[in-house]
Image (tube, helix red, strand yellow):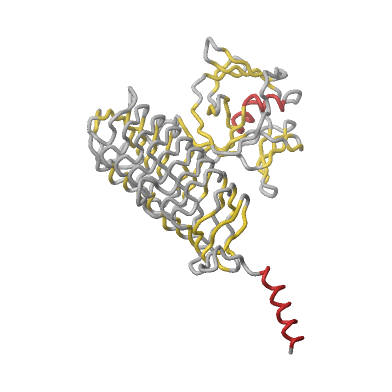
Amino acid sequence: MKKKFAVWFLSLALLLPLLPTAQAASTTTYNYAVEGGNLKFDPTTGTIVGCDYGVYSADIPGEIYGVPVTAIRDNAFYGRSKLASVTIPTTVTTIGSQAFSGCSALKSIVIPSSVTTLKEANSTWGIFSNCKSLESVTIPGTIKRLPKRMFSLCSSLKTVNLGDGVEEIGRDAFGNCTSLESITLPDSVKSIESRAFEYCTNLRTATIGTGIKNISNEAFYNTQRLESLYFRGNAPSATSRMINKFADGFIIYYPAGATGWTTPTWNGYITRSYSPTPSQPTMVTAKPTASTVYVNGTVVAFDAYNINNNNYFKLRDLAFILSGSKAQFEVEWDSAANAIKLTSGRPYTPVGGEMVGKGAINKVGKLTKSAVYLDGKQVSFTAYNIDNNNYFKLRDIGQALDFSVEWNGMRQSIEIDTSLPYRPE
């Protein structure tokens, strides 16, 4: 009998290390190790309920100890100032109030399409309030409402990707996002609540989709640099108080034939119709090009961006790489004429900074207003300035200088061949 008891006791001792470690003997909260510490997980509800203050990277798994992770509780990551990155799994459906508020090192967030509920702010702070390093956010269309104060005081936020399906922009949702320069609201958005964009002091343009029904008073409060609103549909219910400050020359653009608009003013704002589409937007979201790029069969790591499903390359990078080839060209800046001058057939003269770095986050692209000349003749290229460098549509350059630009679907790559002529898509 003693021998059997000893064997049983030894077996139990060997099994104990394999069991999840409880945070406290009196609770069912388990620890799950991530970089810098532990997540706290409640297996009875499938909820992340907290984490250690030292956590700096939280790759949340889809399940912990065999239990699916379905929610992130209120205040779960509140004030974790070291947290620089977090991955939310596609099993999560709910994110609680203030869940990531005060995560001052967090740089980007992608909310998966499994999430359908974002809890409303129950105090001063919203889910991502005061995340001062947050630059880029992606929100799926499965979320119908952005709750109040969701991104308030996110002073570095520049890029907002809203999925078609979002219907309401809550009060102060983007309040004090002082780095936000442009925003595009999908056609699904029906209402913008009061002070949704208050103190977005660098916001210059906003595009508002066809579904908008109501814009509350002071929705754009103290947006003194706002230059334009582009509406894509009928006039919403709004008053002269929806914007209290804007830039000199502010204009509301609306599509010809849309109802409810008046000209030359609407609710006291200067208006202008467009047909069939608005003029080229002055600001766009530029996403780093993920595709591999081949130049004459060799992989080249360009700092390139995708804008409205077209790839834009830094002009001087292209000139640098193509120098010595059949498609070489020189780039010169004429400050007196505010013009970019291209000369085909001439080798490129480097000025420094070519092929430096590759973009990893979304950026804001501003329409390049400089004139462009090729071999002395003015040409019409669409170009954007990103971080003080001009990026041109690759196919425009390929067509102008007659070199091949092709998409290889099999290996998901962009292929440039200077030995072949340009072929239209």
Image-quadrant location for residue 153: top left
Q: Is residue 170 above or below residue 22?
A: above
In the foreground, 339 or 225: 225
Image-quadrant location for residue 222: top left
In the foreground, 279 or 320: 320
In the foreground, 421 or 102: 102
x then y, percent, for residue 104 = 50, 41
Image-quadrant location for residue 234: top left
248 with respect to 337 (left or right): left
Asked if residue 422 can be seen in this view, the reply is yes
In the picture as drawn, the residue positioned furthest to the top comes out as: 336
In the picture as drawn, the residue positioned furthest to the front comes out as: 2
1 with respect to 204 (left or right): right
- Tell me which residue sits at (72%, 31%) in the image: 418
Q: Is residue 11 above or below residue 55?
A: below
Quarter of the image where the C terminus is located:
top right
x then y, percent, for residue 374 = 60, 19
x then y, percent, for residue 248 = 33, 22
Quarter of the image where the N terminus is located:
bottom right
26 with respect to 298 (left or right): left
x then y, percent, for residue 116 = 43, 58
Q: Is residue 122 above or below residue 8?
A: above
- Tell me which residue sits at (47%, 41%) in the image: 131
In the foreground, 418 or 78: 78
Asked if residue 383 can be seen in this view, the reply is no
Number of residue marks: 0
